[in-house]
Amino acid sequence: MSELKGAIRETQAPTPFKYQYINKVHPSFLMPSHYHQDFEMIKVLQGKLNISLNERLYLLNKDDVLFIAEGIAHSIKPCEVNACYESISFNLNQLFDFKKAEYADLKKIVSGEIVITEYFSPKLYPNLQAFIQNLFTVFNPKSNSSILSILGSLISFFGFIIDYGLYQQQSLNLAPKFVRHLCKNSMLFRYIFINYNHNIKLEELAKLMDMSPKYFCRYFLALTGNRPLEYVNRYRIELAAERLGTKGESINEIAFDCGFKNPGYFARLFKRYKGLSPSAYRIRFYTN
């Protein structure tokens, strides 16, 4: 497997849980696309944030919270220099013993069978705010909370999510014969995020999942709504769009680094997905 290059990088907290307070002097204030094998929650304390999860764009205001599942590529762009936010990350595999029946729902969250709602605002989910506030409080090292308090806050939060149906049951959208493959999704998307700037072949992806290419195409379409290589190209375009916001690289350099060897094909695909040519998109970025 190739080295991690370009805008994507993997970060892994050295402990099963981590807290960060992030403002303009923090190195993570402006985060390019990256992913990690932990779950993460971001809460805006001041200002506004633009956050991209794969191709899904969110504008977060004060007190809004975004839940980011493990293995999801995401980028963070504060809208103003005085913005600040909190981040907590946690590895459920390290914190809970999934062999125990009482953690069956947490196991489904990790496997991807249960997909948690991503965006939480105080207006939409007022009853959830106490659980969220407790999470960020006990994760903060200043609280000197015990590991039991941290585990208890996570169980309370996810218990509320399950009790009030703030999730989607992924298996309902997949044929039963596909469900057994869900545990391999993290490995699959990790491979895409690492190798997006190389010539990814359908056969390679299918082999990762121990499927035939034809069977894998049906599975991936049911899972994401996109064909495998269409998803890869959409992902590449999202990365390219982010890098068009910088002045140090030419459009052709960005196209090549994002996995497009033909600049003309890149331009056509970019316009199809973004509605503008790469050059027009860059001009609009700087105009705004």
Image (spheres, rainbow, N blue to C red):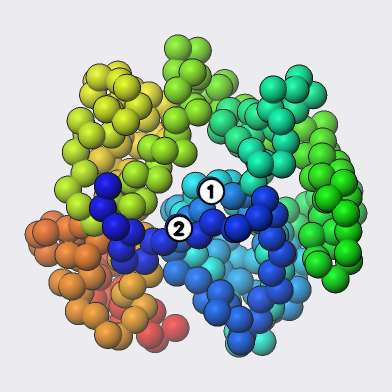
Q: Where is 171 relative to 115, above or below?
A: above
**Residue 40 seen from this side:** yes
The amino acid pointed to by label 2 is Glu
Toward which corner of the image does residue 236 lie, by quadrant? Answer: bottom left
Q: Nearer the viewer, residue 268 or 109?
A: 109
- Residue found 88% across the figure and 59% down from its top: 145
Relative to 211, is 123 on the left or the right? Answer: right
Q: Is residue 67 visible?
A: no
Residue 33 vs 164, above or below: the answer is below
Residue situated in front as seen by the camera: 218 or 258: 258
What residue is at 25 percent from the left and 61 percent from the top?
258
Left/right of residue 4 with respect to residue 263 in the rendered view: right
| SS under mark 2 | loop
The circle drawn on residue 37 is 1
Going 34% across and 44% down the picture, which residue do you hit?
191
Instruction: Look at the picture and state if 43 lies above or below 103.
Output: below
Q: Residue 128, image x and y in percent?
A: 84, 49
Q: Position of residue 143 (x, y in %)?
A: 89, 66
Is 217 positioned to the left or the right of 201 in the image?
A: right
**Residue at 18 percent of width and 73 percent of height:** 253
Is 110 located above or below residue 236 in the figure?
Answer: above
Circle 2 sits on which residue?
A: 10
Say which label, 2 or 1, has the lower sequence index.
Answer: 2
Q: Are marks 2 and 1 in contact (CB under 8 Å)?
A: yes
Q: Residue 204: which disc?
A: none
The amino acid marked with disc number 1 is Gln
- Quadrant assignment for the C terminus: bottom left
Give whichever of 178, 107 is nearer the camera.
Answer: 107
Q: CA distance from mark 2 to mark 1?
A: 8 Å
Label tally = 2
Relative to 157, is 114 on the left or the right?
left
